[in-house]
Image: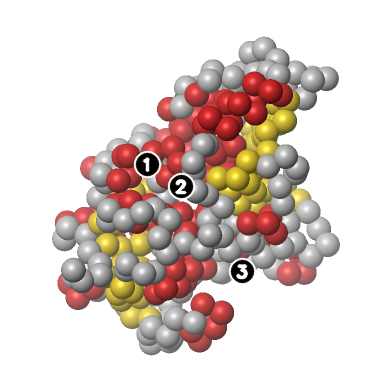
Amino acid sequence: MAEPRVLIAGASGYAGAIAARLVDRHPRLALGPVTSRSDVGRRLSDLYPQHRVDAVLEELDLDRHAGVEAAIVAYPHGAAAPVVAGLRERGVKVVDLSADFRLTDRAVYEEWYVPHETPELLGTAAYGLTELHREAIRGADLVANPGCFPTAALLALAPLARAGLIDGVVVDAKTGVSGAGRAATDATHFVSVTENVKPYKIGAHRHTPEIDQELARLGAPVATTFVPHLLPIDEGELTSCYVTPPAPVAQADLDALYADAYAGEPFIELVNDAPGVREVRETNYCRILAHAEERTGRVLVFAAIDNLWKGTSSQAIQNLNLMLGFDETEGLPR
């Protein structure tokens, strides 16, 4: 049987380029067209020599490029929806890296993003946090890849949410500048970021309703306080979650809860010491530490991921593997 061909739409961005690299090296997939809205005619290896993918970037034309089995769409929110709709009309399985299909409520999406161009597809996508929705992803034709912050926060909090142990939660996240995308702004310019740490989008980050939505689905309908901070590193993300449970939780019970929740998960590492971003760089791993703080009765949970890998592109490959009937670990370094 021929290897499924995969289109990468938006391959000139950070996430799209890594997705192209992973597909190109995948033992069961073939890299199809790679497209760009701004770098047509250039080789991907000219933009990102480190990925060593020599494919030439083309302008997306669904009539020519949709003759593939699957696609990863790495467009910004708003721009992704019509592309996803066009691919689905042609029978292509899609993993969408934008926010366009993560939220199931149109009013909530439009409050935080833009008017939705294909609202008929809202609610039809599987939410692509593999460890929590594996079976839904396995049978899906459209998967909404989670945001990087929700990926780390939800993996950190899911065992507590399912056990009814979250009465309130503060999510404090630190991330590298690559989370802002390839287009530099004053806020992410080297001069602004180096030797500095600062919060941003306080009380207004668009991943907040996504975290709330998914925690509610897990059994914890809470309003999350979420504050991201920008670090002077290129990639990596550390999420610190401060949970108020309905009653104090013993460390032994907490350990058992997380061990049971993530037993056999190939990309979850439960650790006994504070996780750091260097430990997960350019991998699909999430390292988690859960700590019961006896003095306050709170539960502290820390999760480290690479925001461009587990937070975006390698998670997309994990999902695509399931959608195509492969082992979810194929093509992902372990």
Instruction: Check disc 2 and report the residue beneath it.
Output: 146
Spot occupied by residue 275 in the image (x, y as percentages of width and height): 71, 47
Q: Secondary structure at mark 2?
A: loop
| Residue 38 shows in the view | yes
What element does badge 1 sit on?
helix
- Count the marks: 3
Label 3, label 2: how many angstroms apart (C-alpha)?
23 Å
* Mark before the other along the chain sequence, 3 or 1: 1
Q: Which residue is mark 3?
A: 184
Could you give the CA–CA distance between mark 3 and mark 1, rounded to whole angstroms? 35 Å
Q: Is residue 63 shown above or below 224?
A: below
| Nearer the camera: disc 3 or disc 1 | 1
For image coordinates 33% across by 51% down, the residue present is 322
Report the residue at 53% width, 56% height from top.
284
Pointer 1 residue: 134
First of labels 1, 2 by sequence position? 1
Q: Nearer the viewer, residue 88 or 188?
A: 88
Q: Is residue 141 above or below residue 106?
A: below
Label 1: few (<14), some (14–19) or many (≥20) C-alpha neighbours in 10 Å: some
Q: Nearer the viewer, mark 1 or mark 2?
A: 1
Residue 88, horizontal then vertical, whole percent:
21, 55
Q: Residue at x 63, y 56 (%)?
A: 280
Q: Please identify the residue farthest to the top as the structure is shown.
A: 247
**Residue at the spot x=75%, y=61% of the render?**
232
Q: Amino acid at mark 2?
A: Pro
Callout 1 amino acid? Arg
Q: Residues within 10 Å of mark 2 (few under 14, many from 20)?
A: many
Tell me the SS state at disc 3. loop
